Image (cartoon, rainbow, N blue to C red):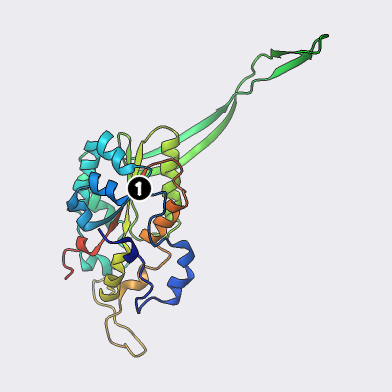
Amino acid sequence: MAQHSDLFDTDRQDFDAADLEVAEDVATRPGPNADSPADIERYISAAVRQRYDVFSYRHAAAILANSFPDELRDIEAALLSFSITQHDIGFPGGNESDMPKKFSQTLRPAGWVETRIQGDLQVRAQQYEEEILENGRTRKTKRPEGAPYIVENYIDGHKIDYVKGRVAFDLEWNSKDQTFDRDLYALRTFHECGLISAGVLVTRSASLNPVFDAVPLLNKRGETVLVDSGPRQGQPKPCKGKYGASTTWMGKLLYRLNAGRHGGCPVLVFGITPKCISDWP
């Protein structure tokens, strides 16, 4: 597993102004509310830890290992079978639609299904009349309870791509970083409604940044895009431009988890590292 101090290296020569502008929204390491690395080593297999950055909040790793071992086994199988190529990384459009398919091949046959919840809020008001007696004491009398007040669609539209039993799983490869707010709110809502006991999120590790500097950008025909001006004219154009600092990656997720945006929901997170790239040196 990568050391926490390596997650966001500001000494890199390619660290540019765009990175500095969003540094306040990035966490370089898990906060004090995260579980200890010892817990992760105890509950997450060495094979997975060798390929992914792993962080746990609110004892998610322990809960999954002890209470939901079958679901954790499914997740680890999907993580170990997940593999991408340099072509996947360089191809235009983010390949957001292709990345989930790689996990679906393992998780869908194992019973993981897309789940959306909706719910109305029923509010009951209990009213009491208070009578002051001659001796100065008071006596309360409950009024007949009226019809409950219904707030329709109080919970609406919260969707998680993979749910099995009481465990939720989702992947964010290259979306806008605000997508993490939606994901964490969905996990929180599912948990507060008593539908899940823990959530799992997968995203890009910061250790992929050097890969994005080296892998060339491709066009829709799969051809290498060349720099069209400047001192590097005619050379392959790196694909790092499509993986901006304001997209979904571990620094953006840890920032939100450290701030407690997942509420009381235990969350286990995995960061995809270069070891998941089949044709990377």
View extreme (top): residue: 134
Q: Nearer the viewer, residue 52 or 166?
A: 52
Rendered image quadrant of residue 267: top left
Residue 222 lies in quadrant: bottom left
**Residue plotted at (20% across, 57% down):** 50
- Which quarter of the image is occupied by the C terminus? bottom left
Residue 245 pos. (x, y %)? 41, 67
| Residue visible at 48% across and 33% down in the picture | 119
In this view of the protein, can residue 249 be seen by the observer? no
Image mark count: 1
Residue at (16% x, 63% y) in the render: 278
Element marked by disc 1 = loop
- Mark 1 crowd level (few <14, some 14–19, many ≥20, 10 Å Cα): some
Quick check: 72 above or below 143? below
Looking at the rendered image, the quarter that the N terminus falls into is: bottom left
Say which amino acid is labelled 1.
Asp
Query: Which residue shows up at 46% across the image and 43% down it?
Result: 263
Left or right placement of residue 261 versus residue 72 in this view: right
Quadrant of residue 225 within the rendered picture:
bottom left
Is 73 left or right of 225, judged from the image as shown? left
- x, y percent for residue 122: 55, 27
**Can residue 245 be seen?**
yes
Residue at the extreme bottom of the image, as rendered? 231
User: Would you place residue 252 above or below residue 261 in this image?
Assistant: below
Q: Please provide percent x and percent y for residue 67.
A: 28, 34
**Residue bearing the label numbered 1:** 35
Give the percent coordinates (x, y) of residue 51: 21, 57
202 w.r.t. 266: above or below = below
